[in-house]
Image (cartoon, helix red, strand yellow):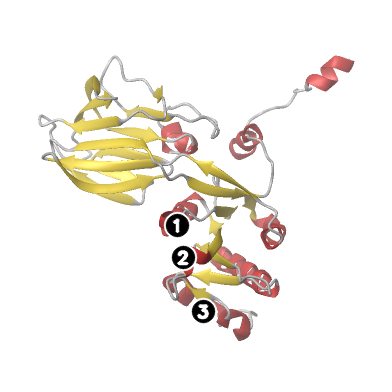
Amino acid sequence: MNEPRFVLVVSHTRRDDAIAAAQVTVQQLVAAGITPVMTSIELQEFKNHARDSELSPDIVAKVAELGNGCLESQLELVMVLGGDGTILKAAEIVRSEAVPVMGINLGHIGFLAESERDGLSDTVQKVVDREYVIQDRLALDVSVIVGGAEVYRTWALNEATIEKSARERMLEVVVEVEGNPLSTFGCDGIVVSTPTGSTAYAFSAGGPVVWPSVEALLLVPLSAHALFARPLVIKPDAKLAVEVLYRSAGHGILWCDGRRSWELPPGARVEVMKSATPVRLARVHESSFTNRLVSKFSLPVAGWRGPDERATS
């Protein structure tokens, strides 16, 4: 007898195209003998939408609820239907179990996604056939220290950002690398990014694109008033810290992946380092990161002939 298989389906429940994609995914998984799983909130939304669709009640009834029967430890994979924000949401749901996450892009750029909407059925079939590979992506452990005591701990896949909380006031910070102060300056904020996040907020702030296979941490100042405030690429096992100086005119705020936040009063210290637990992304295509950059950013490559063509000309 085959072991039961469970796949968590996470979608953007306020978008009709995401709900429709979830229905296709659920139907195909059930037909293959795999149990689709959803969080309680998404399952209710799914049932509400299913009443107005051609999805049979029998199919809907076979969707299990996450948290009911400790399914978390039995999950094989997470299939995410949406953009990068939905993928980050899914990674947060399964963080404690380190379940691999596979994204099907229904958003705009969708850098974290594996496939596009028109390849959904083929991607589900690859999952059914277990024809996928898993890549580990560097994640961040983030802690906030106030008055010498840790008051908050979280993590990030893309980035941890220390930002000013008031638009009209600058944030005064000091940056520390491996226990040594690097520089103090006023700024709008600081982005500490992973290579995965180098194409997200850090990229918009002028940081470099780092290939996901490179182990490194990025530090990118936001609108800094300083002579030395360039983006830095730092070794992966370094501990980075950003302190909000007491002379700062206002409070700051910590954002991790744009999803989790914590207020930073003057004197607060944010420590960031590589997490011992990576985020696992599932892939079905052997596409190079260079090709992904060209595709997602619509980069011009007209005129490229390639090494083989030049050799024979």
Element type at marker 1? helix
x then y, percent, for residue 297: 59, 36
The image quarter containing residue 225 is top left
Q: Which mark is residue 72?
A: 2
**Relative to 248, is 312 on the left or the right?**
right
Q: Earlier in the sequence, mark 3 or mark 1?
A: 3
Element type at marker 3? helix
Residue 140, compared with residue 97, is above or below; it is: above
Mark 3 or mark 1, whichever is nearer to me:
1
Q: Is any part of residue 214 visible from this angle?
A: yes
Of 230 and 286, which appears nearest the observer? 286
Q: Earlier in the sequence, mark 3 or mark 2?
A: 3
In the picture of the structure, the residue carrying the numbered disc 1 is 97
x then y, percent, for residue 3: 63, 70
Q: Residues within 10 Å of mark 2 (few under 14, many from 20)?
A: many
Mark 3 or mark 2, whichever is nearer to me:
2
**Relative to 53, is 202 on the left or the right?**
left
Q: Residue flagged by tag 1: what amino acid is it? A: Glu
**Residue drawn at x 52%, y 29% as measured from the top left:** 214
In the picture of the structure, the residue carrying the numbered disc 3 is 47
Q: CA distance from mark 3 to mark 1?
A: 26 Å
> From the image, which quarter does the C terminus lie in?
top right
